[in-house]
Image: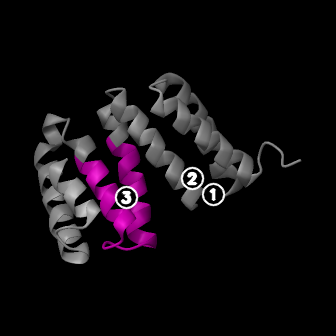
Amino acid sequence: MLGPEHPRTLLGRIRVAKVYYEHWRLEEADQVVTQAIEVLSEVLGENHLDTITAMCLKSDIHWNQGRYETSAELSEIALDWHLEVLGEDHLWTLQCMHDKAWSLSFTWEHLNEAAQLNDHVIRTTTQCFGRDHPTSLYIRIM
């Protein structure tokens, strides 16, 4: 038996939250991922990849619920971690920057910041991975 605090059990919870999210059951997804983040933070720490991954999912859930401010706050936490651990040119960091820019673009007071961040992501992604890389293409059209 793995137990409720075992990392694999916690990853299972995140997967359940992701399934809820993909089926637009956002309230359930938010509840499950919030519980998982609390336990992950205690068991693995706030700066563990699995905890940050769960925060990214929670950010996406909040964005789809129209909770743009909290989505941007969670994106900021995730982005800080990605920058510190993976560096500015890592694909996941650039995706995280893009997600933060997307969240900020829905709040008028942060529109300029969102545009600047998105421009940076487009330039860096194109420079690091090339104009025709799938991530470069995705970021340019979103």
Whether residue 124 is visible, yes or no, is yes
Residue 128 lies, in percent from the top left, at 24, 76
Say which amino acid is labelled 2.
Thr
Sort mark 3 into few (<14), some (14-19) or many (20+) by Cα contacts within 10 Å: many
Residue 94 lies, in percent from the top left, at 30, 63
Label of residue 79 in the image: 3
Q: Quadrant of residue 127?
A: bottom left
First in sequence: mark 3 vs mark 2 = 2
Horizontally, is 32 left or right of 105 in the view? right
Residue 22 lies, in percent from the top left, at 46, 33
Distance from the alpha carbon under mark 1 to that under mark 2: 7 Å
Q: Quadrant of residue 92?
A: bottom left
Q: Residue furthest right?
A: 1
Sort mark 1 into few (<14), some (14-19) or many (20+) by Cα contacts within 10 Å: some
Q: Secondary structure at mark 2?
A: helix
Q: Are marks 1 and 2 in contact (CB under 8 Å)?
A: yes
Q: Secondary structure at mark 3?
A: helix
Q: Report the residue at 67% width, 44% height from top.
A: 12
Residue hosting label 1:
45
First in sequence: mark 3 vs mark 1 = 1
Check the image and report above or below for 25 versus 72.
Answer: above
Q: Report the residue at 63% width, 57% height from top.
A: 45
Check the image and report above or below for 100 versus 22.
Answer: below
Whether residue 39 is visible, yes or no, is no
Q: Report the residue at 55% width, 25% height from top.
A: 28
Which region of the structure is painted magenta? 72-101
Q: Quadrant of residue 50?
A: bottom right
Say which amino acid is labelled 3.
Leu
128 part of magenta stretch: no
98 part of magenta stretch: yes
Residue hosting label 2:
51
Label of residue 125 in the image: none
